[in-house]
Image (cartoon, grey):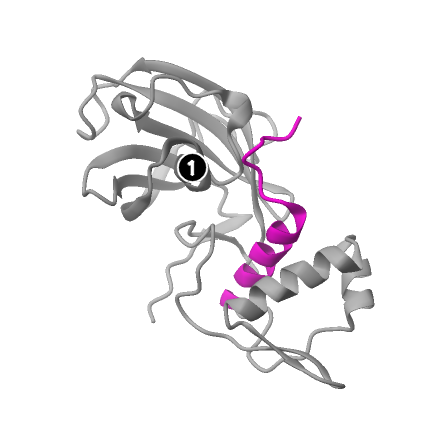
Amino acid sequence: MSSRYALPLHQQTSEMLIREIAAGRIIDGERLPPERDMAAGLGIAVGTLRKALADLEQKGLLERVQGSGNYVRSRPDVESVYAMFRLELGAGGGLPTAGVLSGERVAKTADMPAFGNATDGHRIRRLRSLGGQPAAIEEIWLDGACAEHIAIEDLSDSLYLYYRQALGIWITRAEDRVGVGIVPDWAPADFGVAAGAPAGFIERIGWDREGASVEFSRTWFDPAIARYVSRLR
């Protein structure tokens, strides 16, 4: 059963194209294939593709030229659900999806930095894929003061979107620390790096629009699949 906060298919397509453009896999000025051919290549209906292209046009990433086609117009700082998600496939881009491994409210541990006001938090563990390839595992902690209960079945591929829609929390700033970490023992077999082996590692603290630190996360990523990318404009 899909989450009621899941992105509709046309928005998933739009977000995938936004990431492809940002990564340079679809370049500025490039003419997209005819809509029927493009929809067939993506495995979606033409009507779904047209909704996605309309979203790109509204964001200034697409120019429709009558009788000629649809042309990409690359630009920085485009509004995107995944604007703060920094992992990409090695070749660039890749639509992020996620499967929840576990979720529970537990006491914070001594090995994490101070964040939030509660002594406990909602701990969510997920397997993250890029373009359908398992690429990372995540352990996300949302401060317990932010919500009494989180229904695991309501979580969407984008937690930040879920936070906004379900909890009224907007993560507006984050600090990432990137290095190498040891894959934990709860890593599923689908993740390409075995428990106890080194992997790319990201620690993040996220702040809401009131300036309160409300989230802490750890991400272990497979460097054979994904890379951390931060573009400076």
Residue pictured at 26% horizontal, 41% vertical: 208
Q: Is residue 163 visible?
A: yes
- Quadrant location of the C terminus? bottom left
Residue located beneath label 1 in the image = 220
| Residue 210 image offset from top left, x and y in percent | 20, 42
Residue numbers of the magenta segment: 1-23
Residue pictured at 57% horizontal, 36% vertical: 192
Residue 190 location, quadrant: top right
The amino acid marked with disc number 1 is Trp
| Residue 219 image offset from top left, x and y in percent | 40, 37
Determine the secondary structure under disc 1. strand
- Quadrant location of the N terminus? top right
Magenta segment main secondary structure:
helix
| Residue 215 image offset from top left, x and y in percent | 29, 33
Q: Is residue 130 magenta-colored?
A: no
Q: Is residue 2 magenta-colored?
A: yes
Residue 162 location, quadrant: top left
Left or right: where 37 falls relative to 89: right
Residue pictured at 33% horizontal, 37% vertical: 169
How many C-alpha atoms fall within 10 Å of the one at disc 1: few (<14), some, or many (≥20)?
A: many
In the rendered image of this protein, does residue 212 appear above or below residue 39? above
Q: Is residue 92 visible?
A: no
Front residue of 111/31: it is 31
Front residue of 81/182: it is 81
| Residue 4 image offset from top left, x and y in percent | 58, 32
